[in-house]
Amino acid sequence: MDRAGGFYPLGREFESLQGDVSKGPVVDDVERLLAIEDICALKARYFRCMDERDWDGLAATMAPDLAFEHPTIGRHASAAAALEAVKERLCSLAFTVHQGGMPEIDVHSSEQASGIWSLHSVVMPQGAAGGRPALIHGYGRYFDEYRRIDGEWRISGLRLVHLYKGP
């Protein structure tokens, strides 16, 4: 078991949920760079919609058959189930700020890609401890899979591994 409580980076088990990443036409350099830019914008939208509690916008970032794994929210096998769990968790908090950066995006084909993102999050639980806000900082990595659906990139697999969570 690792420091992240048993969550490991994407492996064969996760990939089997998404299918063979080698399927699809090979992309040239320009297509690859455009895909990377689109995926970076997609992930930025995911973080923004989460923090703004824009549930429709958040749902639009996800493939319907999303494979979702989060250390505090759990495992879910669809976007609808993951979204309900995310809503329940985030609505119990006063506010959240999620910042993702340093993306490592691999474009496998014109239809599939994967990525690793660094995460820093700050959450404030409802209520205040001793009259002062109790902020919780989280640091970790997102391991994502992406699939193009109807010409738009969507998150088809998401696994968060916390490296640290505390004050």
Image (cartoon, rainbow, N blue to C red):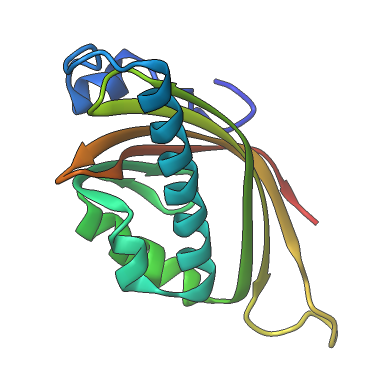
Quadrant of image for the N terminus:
top right
Residue 149 lies left or right of residue 84; in this view the side is left
Q: Is residue 162 visible?
A: no
What percent of the width, then of the height, locates residue 119? 63, 44
Residue 6 lies left or right of residue 141; in this view the side is left
Please name whichever residue, 35 or 17, is drawn nearer the observer in this view of the structure: 35
The residue furthest bottom is: 131
What percent of the width, then of the height, locates residue 78? 20, 49
In the rendered view, would you say 7 is above or below 99?
above
Residue at image x 50%, y 28%?
A: 6
Please name whichever residue, 83 or 22, is drawn nearer the observer in this view of the structure: 22
Please name whichever residue, 90 or 148, is drawn nearer the observer in this view of the structure: 148
What percent of the width, then of the height, locates residue 87? 38, 70
Quadrant of image for the C terminus:
bottom right
Residue at image x 84%, y 88%?
A: 131
Among the 4 quarters of the image, the one containing residue 67: top left
Residue at image x 41%, y 24%?
A: 30
Among the 4 quarters of the image, the one containing residue 149: top left
What percent of the width, then of the height, locates residue 137? 73, 55
The residue furthest front is: 30
Q: How many marks on residues?
A: 0
Residue at image x 29%, y 62%?
A: 59
